[in-house]
Image: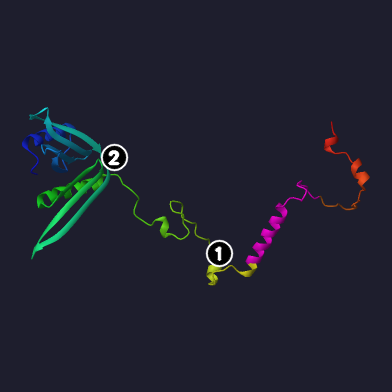
Amino acid sequence: MPFLNDEVKEWIALELESLGVEDLAVYALEAGQEGDERRVMVATEVGLLDHRYAPFGSSARYRLAMLMYPWQVLRGVELRADTFRLWAREHRTRWSFRLHHPHFEAATESPDLGQALCDLARVCAVMAEPFGVPAGRVSSEVPGAIPGGPRPIPPTPDSPKAVAEEDGDGTEPKDIAEAEGESEAEAATEAAPPSGGATSTAVPIGEGEELIELSDEDKAAVPTRSDEG
């Protein structure tokens, strides 16, 4: 690890001793515009320690600032590897590692640094919380599903659609279709109100009773609710 000097190693060792943990993986790289700053990521049992080692006030004084990210807040672990052939029987691999939170990116073609990057990525991938959409079928792959919505309920064996599919013609049987059509027509007739806009309830004629047609004068003499009071 070329960017780790004895001072940084000693200070990080003191932190680990205070926390009572050991380093599972370590990776360091240059940071800042001047190149005097270092960023050191240390994976431990309790979380990821993000270090900044940079001059403090002057080039003669340095400071190591640390922020611990518990594994529960770590998001988006990405590791990429590109292996290419240089010439016969020789090849090189470029490793690229990225974290979404906390944001961290590193890439190297050095075999030793690549191994260190793989160690860090392996620990982060195991310890970090899931990120993004879980792997599996998406709603667009299911016929009749609304994107982002629940999947359609499969038909039961007793449903008319399932019976029709078992027949092989893909349509409902004629008697079932006619019965459904008649029931829908009856429901529409019962739900439709009279032309006058008022609703009325039919009363069946009992035994020994007959329907008497009243004249207009008799109808006018029958009291109504508007006559009360």
Residue 55 location in percent, x, y? 11, 31
In the picture provided, is 141 more to the left or to the right than 208?
Answer: left
Number of numbered discs overlaid on the protein picture: 2
The residue at which mark 2 appears reads as 73
Q: Confirm or deny contact between disc 2 and disc 1 (CB under 8 A).
A: no
Q: Nearer the viewer, residue 80 or 30?
A: 30
Q: Residue at x 72, y 54 (%)?
A: 190
Q: Secondary structure at mark 1?
A: helix
The residue at which mark 1 appears reads as 161
For disc 2, the neighbor class at 10 Å (few under 14, some 14 to 19, many from 20) is: few
For disc 1, the neighbor class at 10 Å (few under 14, some 14 to 19, many from 20) is: some
Tell me the amino acid under the disc marked 2: Val
Q: Nearer the viewer, residue 72 or 146?
A: 146
Q: Secondary structure at mark 2?
A: helix
Decide: is 13 above or below 140: above
Q: Earlier in the sequence, mark 2 or mark 1?
A: 2
Query: Residue 227 — which label?
Result: none
Residue that protrudes farthest toward the top in the picture: 57
- Magenta residues (range): 176-202
